[in-house]
Amino acid sequence: MNNPDREQQKRVNDYFQSTLAYWDEIYREGGVYQTIYQRRRTVALSLVDKLALPAGSRVLEVGCAHGLTTVALAERGFSVEAVDAVPEMISAARIRAQESGLAQRMSFQVADIQNLPFEAGRFNLVLVIGVTEWLRSLEQPLREIERVLRPGGHLVIAADNRYALANMLDPLRNPVGVYLKGILQALLKRFGYRRRSPPERSYSIRQFDSFLCAAGLTKAEGKTVGFGPFSFCRRPLLAENTGLKLDQSLQRLADSSLPLLRSSGYVYIVLAVK
């Protein structure tokens, strides 16, 4: 009998295995997507810093990839356990940990967020960045996160924002234009367009908050970041430099509490508590 979650995970694993270098380079390059991912990481770590957890606190990072954020957590004095579903990612993360000189503060293993290999109540903090968009559903993963958190423990988690401004302006990404989206996708398929990556899932802010609540996690703070890349039928509308300038300008407006833009960023980042 087919297991849809397992099939989705295999497809995601195959995709990440074929794009390993890209997911390392993305935190060093300067394009719009890259800048958004870098900002997502910066905001997530700033939420961690606001908690002022003591040195030695137990932290779990789910979806550690090449270990860049794992090392940043270890640099803060935490005892970090990191997991990823892709074995090649774990190998790369171990190399980065050794190069950091802080390997004694980090451990790595291949594991699935659907079934975390840890006892209940083990962690003070769980960090989940760049994972939810690749999951077929959220219920079981969030239950697992809640299980391994201590009472009063915190979760920093990110999700793609379904109603991001960049999505609303592209008919193929706009969640409202379902009928038009189907027609355009059929036309693109007819003319040879194929998605290379697995389908990514996004959530409205209210929907994502409700998933957290159902899992026994309460939102303490949330923020959206990233504006772009802007496209039409998934084709870029702006040159990279223009897109970067627009992203930076819109982010400044969002950070100044302009109501519409505050909830229109590409990624939604949440600090929640058990």
Image (cartoon, helix red, strand yellow):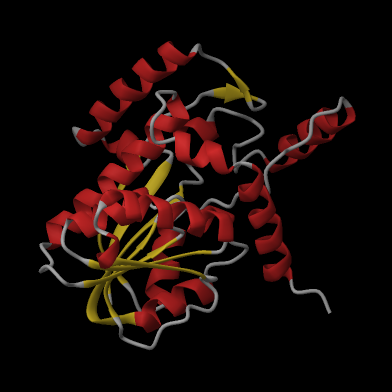
Residue 161 point in image, percent of width and height: 46, 46
Quarter of the picture containing the C terminus is bottom left
Q: Give the residue drawn at x 46%, y 34%.
A: 25
Query: Along the line of sight, which residue is nearer the eye, 155 or 256?
Result: 155
Q: Is residue 249 left or right of residue 234?
A: left
Determine which quarter of the picture holds residue 50.
bottom left
Residue 58 point in image, percent of width and height: 24, 74
Determine which quarter of the picture holds residue 150.
bottom left
The furthest residue to the bottom: 120
Q: Is residue 205 visible?
A: no
Q: Is residue 58 visible?
A: yes
Residue 73 point in image, percent of width and height: 25, 57
Q: Is residue 79 above or below residue 174?
A: below
Query: Along the line of sight, which residue is nearer the eye, 4 or 220?
Result: 4
Residue 135 point in image, percent of width and height: 58, 61
Q: Give the residue drawn at x 41%, y 52%.
A: 95
Quarter of the picture containing the N terminus is bottom right
Q: Is residue 216 above or below residue 24?
A: below
Q: Is residue 209 above or below residue 152?
A: above
Q: Give the residue drawn at x 58%, y 52%.
A: 201
Query: Along the line of sight, which residue is nearer the eye, 79 or 2?
Result: 79
Query: Along the line of sight, which residue is nearer the eye, 4 or 85?
Result: 85
